[in-house]
Amino acid sequence: MTSPKYLRTLDKELERRGYSLQRTKKHRVYYNAELGKSLTTSKSPSDRKTHYRIQQVIKQNEKQFLEEDF
């Protein structure tokens, strides 16, 4: 079970990176208008590596965006 503290930390980090929370019905869906990318996570992730994996996906999206500019 995921603690609310973890979700708040994740929300703050994603907001700092430009993602906004779109919906939370079955999953947590975030969208970054600048990159034109969406990110979907489980509503209650139980895996310890979830936060790390989300950070990897964000970095990957940002890298792809920078490569498209050139």
Image (spheres, grey):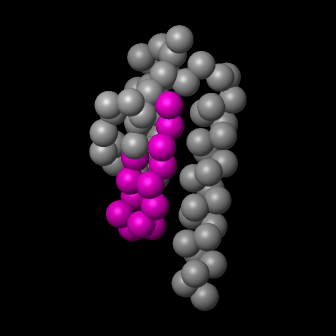
Asked if one can make out residue 38 in the rendered structure from this viewpoint, the answer is yes
Q: Which residues are magenta?
A: 30-42
Residue 40 in picture, x, y percent from top left: 48, 43
Tell me the quarter of the picture where residue 14 sits. top left
Q: State yes or no: residue 39 in magenta.
A: yes
Residue 61 in picture, x, y percent from top left: 58, 61
Asked if one can make out residue 18 in the rendered structure from this viewpoint, the answer is no
Residue 11 in picture, x, y percent from top left: 41, 35
Q: Main secondary structure of the magenta part?
A: strand
Residue 35's place in the image compared with 68, above or below, is: above
Tell me the quarter of the picture where residue 54 sits. top right
Q: Residue furthest bottom?
A: 70
Q: Is residue 64 left or right of residue 33?
A: right
Residue 1's place in the image compared with 33, above or below, is: above
Residue visible at 58% across and 81% down in the picture: 68
Q: Is residue 44 left or right of residue 46?
A: left
Residue 22 in picture, x, y percent from top left: 30, 45
Q: Looking at this view, is 59 or 30 the one in front?
A: 30
